[in-house]
Structure formats: C-alpha cells, structure tokens
Image: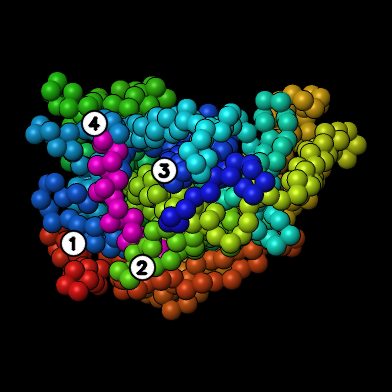
Amino acid sequence: MAAKVSVKSKNGKVRRAIVVGGGLAGLMTVIKLCEAGIPVDIISLVPVKRSHSVCAQGGINASVNLKGEGDSPSIHMEETVLGGDFLANQPPVKGMAEAAPGIVFMLDRMGVPFNRTPEGNLDFRRFGGTLFHRTAFSGATTGQQLLYALDEQVRRYETMDVTDDRGVTIPGEKMVRKFEFWDMCDVIFDDNGIVRGIIAQDLKTSEIRAFMGDAVCLATGGVGMVYGRSTNSVINTGSAAAVAYRRGAIYSNGEFIQVHPTAIPGADKLRLISESVRGEGGRVWVPRDQNDKRAGKDIPEKERYYFLEERYPAYKNLVPRDIASREIFKTVVHEGYHTRPGVRAAFLDVTHLAKTPSAKQALRNKLEGVLEIYEKFAGEDPYENPMEIFPAVHYSMGGLWVDFEQDARGSLKIGSPKNAMTNLPGLFATGEADYQYHGANRLGANSLLSCIYGGMVTGPAMASWREGAHGSAFDMDNGIFEKAAQRARDEFEGYYKRTGGSYTENAFKLHDELAEEMLVKVTVERKNDELDGVIAKIAEFNERFEKCAVLDTTPTGKMNQPAVFLRHMRGMLDLAEVIVRGARARDENRGAHYKPIFDPDRKEAKEYAGEGAGKGRDDENWLKTTMARFTKDGPKFDYEKVDISLVKPRARVYKQASMDAAKGTIGATDAKTADAKQAST
C-alpha cells in the first residue's frame, strides 16, 4: 500500500472513495480504506444491516485444525479449486485460504458469538465438499452476526472526523458517510476512460445526483432475481453489475449459477435450509415405495432410501452442492421418488438428532435459527417431522471480471492496484459481484470468507490506485459529473412518459415470464434446444420491454418503485442473456453447469448416446473463463485461460468407499508440495 495518503485534492476538496453495497464485502472494503486514512461514501440499496449477507446461515470456513484432523490452508485451497472444478484462478484462492484462520480470529475478537466447544475453543462443523471440520459458526445465523460486527466497526468511522495532512480537523467531514435507500444508476468516466464516480438515485425522493470518487467499488451481491424465485433477497437483481456491464465492464462465467440442494418450496420465494443442517448430521432420503402416503415420521428406517449415502459413501450427505442438487433432482424428477404422491420434494431429516430433551436442546443451540424458518413457513415442527426440501437457485459464481497480481509464493500481492479491479480503470468489484474465488461451483461457507477476504484485498488495492498518477476526480471540471447526472435524470424522466398508447406491457409480469423461462430451463439441467428457445424468448422480452408502461404516475420528487423497477428489469434482461448464451456455448459438464447429453464421468452409456457420448468435463477446450462484453446485438464472448499453477486439474471423484480413502486423494498434491518447497527456501 502507498505510504502517503493525500486527504485533499489540489483545489482543497476532501478526496473520497465510493463503495456501493453494504454487505460483508462492502463493509470490509470500507474498513480497510478507513484504516488507510481514506474517507468513504457507502451507497446502499437498503439499510446496511438489511444487506443480503444477513441471510447467510451456516458458517465461515477456516482451516484452524482445532480438531486435529490434519487440515491446513493448503488443503482448504485444494478442496476449493477441486469443488469449483478447476475454473477458479488459483492464486486468489490460495490467498483466501491462507488468510482464513486470521479472519475468523479477528471476527472472534470483534465479538462475533461463535459457538464453542465445552473446552472453550471455537467449534467447527463440516460442510459440503470437504472431509474436515472447517466451518466456524454462530448457530444458524452466522451471516447476521458477522454483518452486525462489521457494521459496528464501520459505525465508529461514521463518528470520526476527517483530518488533513497536518492532522487538522476538516469541519463537517466524517470518515464514512452512509447513503441508505440509494440505487446506483450509472458510472462516470473522464475523457480518458477512467471511472471517476457514480450516479445514484434516492429511492425516497427520486433525486438523482453525482458522487465523485477517486476509486469506486461495487460490492452489490448476486443476480438471484433474474430467476424470480430463489433463496436470494428480492433486492438481488444484479442491477449495479448490469450497469457496469453496459458501460463496458466484462462479465465473466455468468453461466455458473449455484442451485442449493435444500430449500423450502414456496409460491413467493424459496427459503434456504442451510447446509449446516447436513453438517450437523441431517440426512436426505425419500420413501422407497413411490406410492407411500404416510407422513415421513411414520415411515420406518428400512423403508427409507438414503440415496446420497448409498451413492457417495465417503462424503454421504456432504457432497458438493452441484452434485447434491443433481442427485436430488434426478431422484425426484427422473426416477419418480417423492415425499408424498404429487409432491416434488425429498426429506431432510434431523429427527434422529432430537430423540431426547438434552439432544434436542443441543440441536437447537446449533440450528435453531434455520429450523425456526422451516417451522414458520412450512407449519411443521422439524424436531418431530422430516422437512420437505427441493433444490433452489442460490448463488452466482459468475460476476464482473476482476484482475489480480500474484506474489512470489503464488498467492496475492496485497496492495497491488490490479487486485479486484475490473477492466474499467478505477472500478473495482468484490464479494458475490465478482467472479474470482469459486470457479464452477462454490463450496458451502466459502461465501462469507470470500466476501471478507475480498474486502481485505480490495481496500488496499483501491488505496494504491488512488495514490497513483491518475489525478483526482475532485480536481476535475464539475461539468463531467453534472452531464452524467442529467443524462440519468433524462432517462428516468423518460420512464414517466411511458403511459398509454403503445405502452401496453407490465414490467412485473414480463419479469415473471423471464423468471419462469430461466427457472425451468437454465438451472440444474440444461439442454441446448431449450437454451436456444430461451435465447429466442429473451429477444422477444427485449422488444416487449420497450413497450413497458411506468404503471405509477406519481410526480417526480416522490418514491416511484415501478419506475425504478424498469431500470432493474433492463439489467436483468442483459444478465439473463449473458447467462443463457454462455451456457449454450459451453458444451461440457463443469460444476454447476450440467448438460445431461454429456456423460459426467466420460464413460459411454446408453443414456448418453449420441452427440455427448463419452464427453464430460472438457479441460482441453473449456478450462477457460467466459468473458462477456456488451454490444447492442447481445453479448460478445471471448475466453481466458485459467491460472492452474498450483493444483493440477483432475477428475472430481467423490465416490470413494470410505472417508480414509477419500482423504488419501486430498492433501498430497501440488498445493502441499509447493508449500513445502516455499517453506524450505
């Protein structure tokens, strides 16, 4: 990081940075910027403490190895790139895994109420895709506890005055200014193509204004609302990322959408049942008799089909999420099993863990938050009745493309201005908004880790960029900013004119149609003919979008949600096309991207006859990052080779007969060897 931090620009204005998004990634970025002495403006669509990070349940990964299983950051890194089917650049993953123990201990010092063992040590549970107890947790509300802890740290900076280079207080200037209920509308460039700020709108008054920034970070989460019903908050439309994409930012690996194996089916949205339930011993099963009409609790053990345990005896119910989702989908949809006739669901069962009052209390101590959700929305006591679940859209592995700089050890060079920067100079991205850490499939409990580590990388990178030879936004002609703001005002005013005449479409109904196409045809299984149909549908939706009416004619100066939704709908259509066209082009199976015509094990079989016979993961042609650029005719794709310098790609094998056999394939690889070599030099 640069040694000198200049607080004022040449003309005497306070030089601020901008962070869009108030979740874990955004807040940690703010903390690191403030630690470097850089004032920050936070722009948040909702109150910071309502950011989607609050919904995370299960935990945060760190190879602390307090249970003496032989775990290490090297193994954590290896399992992450293996779980992601080798599509993640490995140096950032190495940096994240190495930083993880320190991050968990830092959060502990901040006061996060992590669960502890009887000896007083931090407790760790197992999560999917790993053979080790690596996940620190705070009951089943870990995201909430982490978000509140970081928010408290940021609130300190909201009360701190900005001081100049001589230590003199600058009247009226605080280290952090928070703008909640503001929506990003556009990115501001100077004449050299450098990002110099953003345009945002106050959702309470519809005011649109420019925010200057000497570095801008998007930490705005995922795109779950492209699918309508998902485990995501309804704010997760991907609008800010879509704005950046339209303005020239590369969007990478959009086709990789994680479908979580266990959620509560619902007509309005799909509510997550955390992987922590399986981590604590929950079991997935269906009745062996497909016509069984009994309640789950009345079906005896010998008449239950524990299909994950039978098919994956080492990992059992904790195979990676892409595999678990496909197996549940296959068992219920294709093989015809279900919880009751006519219901597409499997059971997730913890009743065997609550047989006695003391056992029930122990389970409540670890899972109460998530089990309460099931009881509230399903109307059944999960301590007494197996829960009905089905896979649901959950996470975006893809996102804005960002760069990195590797250090001599093969990790990240902290403080490099290249880290977390998009292809637009001065614009950074982190958290679920970027594509960096998870490849083709995210391992559970790596999301909170990647958000916090991402912020720890992005803050120093922004500080270094800010001190480079780029000048300051605060010394530039104000006309650049006012012109951009006026363009956004004119666009928004244009929405008010969408009444009567040819404006016959309802944007909310159009979104429902888009969501249905995406949810049915672009999730667990993907078929090229269906993807072609979705691409044609999106072209139709784009035409119909131009005929969408504003619906609410409330005068300018007041809240108008239907008008704002038009902007978000535009972005969802753009990102939906990136997702679908990327999936259509990628003729292979990799992580969450699965085409049934291709054999996942590359073994010819009758069910894989024809075009895809013998094909599965295609490292020779597809060990590459998808790079989508916006054009008026749709996304243009290029591909970039993945950095595989630390762990050699190999087949993902999760079907070992025992845990010992499975552990024998983990940890004795290039990653561990490389660390040993580095330690000896």
- Residue at figure coordinates x 81%, y 24% from the top left: 555
Residue numbers of the magenta segment: 86-109
Identify the element where label 3 is drawn: helix
Q: Nearer the viewer, residue 71 or 662?
A: 71
- The residue that disc 4 covers is 366
Point out the tag, 3 or 2, that comes first from the N-terminus. 3
Image position, residue 368 (x, y; %)? 28, 26
- The residue that disc 3 covers is 35
Whether residue 97 is visible here, answered yes or no, is: yes
- The residue that disc 2 covers is 407
Evaluate if marks 3 and 2 touch, with contact meaning CB atoms under 8 Å apart.
no
- In which quadrant of the rendered image does the C terminus lie? bottom left
Image position, residue 31 (x, y; %)? 43, 41
Viewer-nearest of discs 1 and 2: 2
- The residue that disc 1 covers is 662
Vertical placement of residue 640 versus 290, above or below: below
Residue type, numbered disc 4? Lys
Image position, residue 2 (x, y; %)? 45, 56
- Residue at figure coordinates x 21%, y 33% from the top left: 115
Q: Nearer the viewer, residue 424 or 124?
A: 424
Vertical placement of residue 31 versus 254, above or below: above
Viewer-nearest of discs 3 and 4: 3
| In this rendering, position of residue 470 left or right of residue 61 | right
Identify the element where label 4 is drawn: helix
Density class for disc 2 (Cα within 10 Å; few <14, some 14-19, many ≥20) is few
Image quadrant of residue 562? top right
Residue type, numbered disc 2? Asp
- In which quadrant of the rendered image does the N terminus lie? bottom left
Distance from label 1 to label 4 (Cα)? 27 Å
Evaluate if marks 4 and 2 touch, with contact meaning CB atoms under 8 Å apart.
no
Viewer-nearest of discs 4 and 2: 2
| In this rendering, position of residue 575 left or right of residue 113 | right
